[in-house]
Image (cartoon, helix red, strand yellow):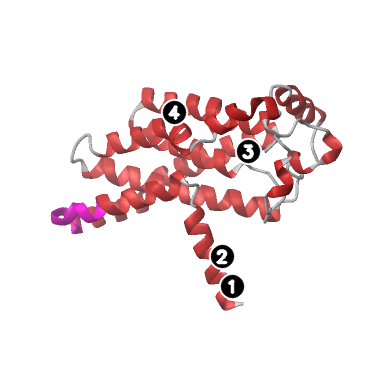
Amino acid sequence: MNGIWDQELLRSLNSFGGSESRYLWELVNNELVRGFPLFFALIALWFSGDCRERRSRMLTGLLAVCVATVLSVWLQFHLASHTRPLLDPALQLKIIDDHRWRVVWDRTGSFPSDTSTLFFALATVTLLENRWAGLFCFLWTTMVVALPRVIFAWHYPSDIIGSLVLGPTCVFLFSAIPYPRKFFERVLTWFEGRMYIVHALLFIFLIDAANLFQSLEQAGKGLVRMWE
């Protein structure tokens, strides 16, 4: 169920959407555009110096990003709070070319936004290492990732608020627990003479993260079907 404020704010923001704004949606949904500042900041911080403590903190944060994203998808499947706005004809929203019927939806729930959860969590990882870069990443995520998803009726405002709580909270919690960080410090110590392996794995992780972990999600679904 949605509050009146949720639907009213959705309708107000959706007034800027619709087919006439198709190119804006294509721009902000472009993987390079929406992800460049965050992934550039993460890679720059990673290579800014050979500091094992900082890199272990970042790896801990990236682990939390995975957990937060998985939780957001799980909640969409199991927490039937409301239907995705563009799939609800009763709302009479402005939809781009009625593309909702050309997509195979494996989940119709939209709380919280998994995309926004991922990017808010990544911004938090950056924030913990560099305040100004992190604040810029938060602003970018809000304006380029989160807000357009309400304007174009993919999510309610409450979905974005939920992702703003879930993503950063997971990162802060993991950062407060010493065990993951100590584990990654040991791993980095083991690979001290072979850091190119760690760098390669990090790049693979970031590539899949930029693609919203779709490859990992598909692999997981495939494994589940194999055991059914």
Q: Amino acid at mark 4?
A: Cys
Residue at image location 74% in from the left, 47% down from the top: 101
> Pointers 4 and 1 in contact (CB under 8 A)?
no
The answer to whether any part of residue 16 appears in the image is yes
> Closer to the observer: label 4 or label 1?
1
**Residue hosting label 4:** 137
**Residue hosting label 2:** 221
Q: Amino acid at mark 3?
A: Gly
Residue at image location 70% in from the left, 49% down from the top: 102
> Pointers 4 and 3 in contact (CB under 8 A)?
no
Magenta-colored span: 190-198
C-alpha gap between disc 4 and disc 1: 37 Å
| SS of the residue under disc 3 | helix
Mark closer to the chain start, 4 or 2: 4
C-alpha gap between disc 4 and disc 2: 31 Å
In the rendering, at what x and y percent does residue 40 appear? Answer: 34, 34
> Pointers 2 and 1 in contact (CB under 8 A)?
yes
The answer to whether any part of residue 177 appears in the image is no
| SS of the residue under disc 2 | helix
Mark closer to the chain start, 4 or 1: 4
C-alpha gap between disc 3 and disc 2: 25 Å
**Residue hosting label 1:** 225
Q: Amino acid at mark 1?
A: Arg
Residue 191 forms part of the magenta stretch: yes
**Residue neighbourhood size for the residue with mark 2, other residues' Cα within 10 Å, grouped as few (<14), some (14–19), many (≥20):** few
Mark closer to the chain start, 3 or 2: 3
In the rendering, at what x and y percent does residue 166 appear? Answer: 56, 41
> Closer to the observer: label 4 or label 3?
4
**Residue neighbourhood size for the residue with mark 3, other residues' Cα within 10 Å, grouped as few (<14), some (14–19), many (≥20):** some
**Residue hosting label 3:** 162
Quadrant in which residue 133 is drawn? top left
Q: Quadrant of the N terminus?
A: top right
